[in-house]
Image: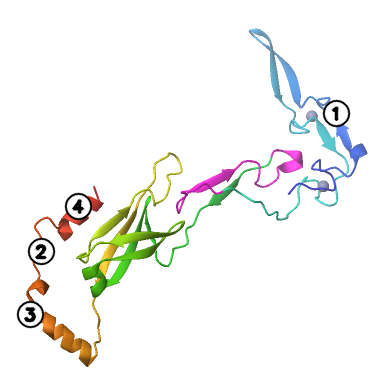
Amino acid sequence: MLCTTCTGSGAKDKNSVQNCGTCGGSGQVRRVQNTFLGQMQTVTTCPTCNGEGSTVTHKCTACKGDGRVYGEETVTIDIPAGVQEGMQLSLSGKGNAGERGGSAGDLIVLIEEESHPQLHRDGLNVAFDLHISIPDAVFGTQIEVPTIDGRAKIKIPPGTQSGKIFRLKGKGFPNVNSYEKGDQLIQVNVWTPQHVSSAEKDMLEKLQHSENFQPKPDKNDKSFFDKVREMFS
Ligand SMILES: [Zn+2]
Ligand SMILES: [Zn+2]
């Protein structure tokens, strides 16, 4: 941080800063050399003051002449929507103070994502695993699902198969560099109970050989392989 005692000059007080005697305050020294081509003038950085033009006779005691001290500052920053793990935000001039009033460096903020308990990020898209009961899959239902900015209602039509993917257009992440927006993909999983009571067992046994409960996959239903291909295309 900038030393507040000397406001970055590194000097004890105003009288402790003197014009450099070697260069007269310009920070540069000219040298004239005689060569066989005639006189040649070269300009170099003053070796006494390193180009600063002034020298400090008595150093500031708070910063020992450095013009800056160790310290911490809390800054508030704007995070643009859609940032991703590994991205860096650079805040110019918010880094370490420069030596003796020199310009400050930049603050580099590295983005790390915390994972969501239910939603999974896949680039701009968001994936969500939805579990529904067998009766809900047969009769259809309305269900609320979490989204990145709240909740959304989706309609599960009667006869929904396990593995069906619903797409909520534009409910994904915005692209930080464009107007593009991702989608939320909801995969349906029909929940199979692991334990049943004897009454439930009786009901299921009645359904076991019922004609409507025999699997008859529709040719139009996308296979697992089609879905995988679709998701990566
Ligand atoms: Zn100081
Ligand atoms: Zn000098």
The quarter of the displayed image where residue 72 is located: bottom right
Tag 1: amino acid: Gly
Foreground pick, 121 / 96: 121
- Would residue 64 appear left or right of 88 to someone viewing this image? right
Q: Give the label on residue 223, or none.
A: none
Tag 4: amino acid: Arg
Regarding mark 4 in the picture, which secondary structure is present there? helix
Q: Earlier in the sequence, mark 1 or mark 2?
A: 1
Task: Tell me if residue 21 is in the magenta stretch.
Answer: no
Q: Is mark 4 within 8 Å of ligand 1?
A: no
Tag 3: amino acid: His
The chosen color scheme is rainbow
List the residue tagged with mark 1: 21
Q: Earlier in the sequence, mark 2 or mark 4?
A: 2
List the residue tagged with mark 2: 217
Q: Earlier in the sequence, mark 3 or mark 4?
A: 3
Foreground pick, 74 / 12: 74
Rendering coords of residue 137 (x, y %):
23, 69
List the residue tagged with mark 3: 209
- Would residue 137 appear left or right of 48 to someone viewing this image? left
Do residues under tags 2 and 4 come within 8 Å of each other at their CB atoms?
A: no
Mark 3 surroundings: few (<14), some (14-19) or many (≥20) residues within 10 A: few
Regarding mark 2 in the picture, which secondary structure is present there? loop
Q: Earlier in the sequence, mark 1 or mark 3?
A: 1
Q: Main secondary structure of the magenta part?
A: loop
Rendering coords of residue 82 (x, y %):
46, 49
Rendering coords of residue 228 (x, y %):
21, 56
Q: CA distance from mark 1 to mark 2?
A: 94 Å
